[in-house]
Amino acid sequence: MYNDTIKAENKIIDSQELAKIFQMMGDTLKKYQRISADEDRRNSMLDYLYQSYTFKDEGSNFRAVVDFYDNTNIKFDKYDSFMGIFYSRLSEIKSMQITFSLNYSVITPEPNRSRNAYYNHISMYITDKRLDIDLDLNSDDNKLEDIYNCIKEVVLMAPEKYDDVIKKRNKIANVISLGYGLIPALVVTTLLLFIPGLNTIFFKGYVVYPIIAVFLAFIIGSLLTSSKMDKYYEPILPEQKSAGYDSNYNRIYKDDIETFTNTSDILIGKKVDYLANRQKIQEEYGKYKKLLPKELIALGIMMVVVIIIGFFI
């Protein structure tokens, strides 16, 4: 083990993953404090020179400072108290500073008395955009190896923030709009076939029926799904930055991808629902992506029927 700094960039880190790290810290601290207390009791009956410790606590601790959006903060020196607030006020948390220390001595008694000190420290600074972790771990000590590996796994295995939900949002919006609107559009377009004069255009212009049907599908679908999709998308999209001017001297904006990918979505505070938003978008996209081929087959069948009727009138 060694000194290390881990920064989460372009990641989505769920609060449950943070809780897993905190729990490992709390459980580890309690475990070794119990060992130290047991060894204190055993050694209390022995002369100082003949006392031995596999773990003599030298001020190990778990501390947290939590800042809230209402400009208040709470300081904790007990893991259990901190976790109670973490779960109950997760959406109110603006930032957290977590420090975990495992400091102890290993003592060998006479005749070869020795005392070796070990100091291990983990610091985490967390906001809804940042997860910065500094580790100062004794290279001769593996007591925090599980926590170190857990932290690396949480960061490295976290899903990307700049994923297909963001990259392909236009395609996703089109599939949802078309999938949602195609059936009512087919109904409306089919009803137009019964209007004298207008139906001749459909029967003689073979491509008119599918063009009108698809056009209406996008209109209907966009009108009925855009507000819901905007609600899911608006919080998670990159901010816009200026990209110059067009030929008419109107300012052009584009996604600020660099800033977007240099930060993360840590699902605390205002970002508690960000992963749920992505999941809802993916559910909508998956539903209409699956339905759309069947709707296109129906459109093809209706087109064939219109062509056949057109031959006989």
Image (spheres, rainbow, N blue to C red):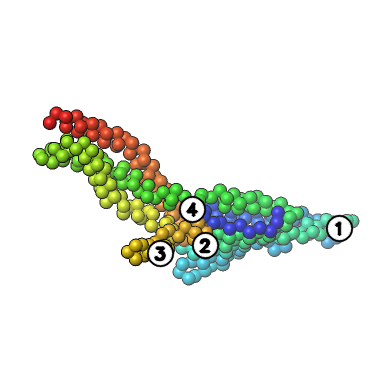
**In the structure shown, which secondary structural element does the residue marked by tag 1 occupy?**
loop
The CA span between labels 4 and 1 is 54 Å
Point 31% across, 52% down: residue:
226
| Quadrant of the snapshot with the C terminus | top left
Q: Is residue 58 above or below residue 144?
A: below
Q: Dot 4: what SS? A: loop
Looking at the image, is 98 positioned above or below residue 20? below
Q: Name the residue under label 2.
A: 127
- Binning the other alpha carbons within 10 Å of mark 4 as few (below 14), some (14 to 19) or many (20 upward) gives many
| Quadrant in which residue 197 is drawn | top left
Q: Mark 3 points at which residue?
A: 244
Q: Whole-Å distance between the Cαs marked 2 and 4?
A: 15 Å
C-alpha distance separating marks 2 and 1: 47 Å
Instruction: Check the image and name the residue furthest to the left.
Output: 196
- Amino acid type indicated by mark 1: Arg
At label 3, the amino acid type is Gly
Say the numbered circle drawn on residue 161: 4
